[in-house]
Amino acid sequence: MAQAVRRAIRAPRRADAHRSLPDLPGRPADRRHPLVALAMVLPCAAVLAVAFGGWDAVVTQASSVAGMLGR
């Protein structure tokens, strides 16, 4: 019985734990659309790929796959 009471007390705290930031005024509390998130991430990913040489690795892998498919 005591365990059930403890679980009932802890449950609301865990449910609210996913909200780490307060809701901003004038902004809905919903999650953002996946395409908006993608549009925000892609420019940053492209800059990091170019800055750290990741673009060359992607081109190398793509050319290897294309060579294997062309056999």
Image (tube, rainbow, N blue to C red):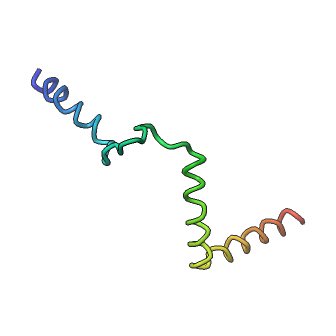
19 left or right, relative to 6? right
19 left or right, relative to 35? left
Image quadrant holding the C terminus, namely bottom right
Between residues 46 and 28, which one lies in front from this camera angle? 28
The number of discs equals 0
**Where does the image place residue 20, in percent across and percent down from the top left?**
31, 47
Q: Is residue 20 above or below residue 1?
A: below
Quadrant position of residue 3: top left
Quadrant position of residue 13: top left
Which residue is outermost to the right?
71
Name the residue rendered at 35%, 45% in the picture.
24
Which residue is outermost to the left?
2
69 left or right, relative to 44? right
**Where does the image place residue 2, in percent across and percent down from the top left?**
9, 24
Which residue is outermost to the front?
26
**Where does the image place residue 46, in percent across and percent down from the top left?**
62, 68
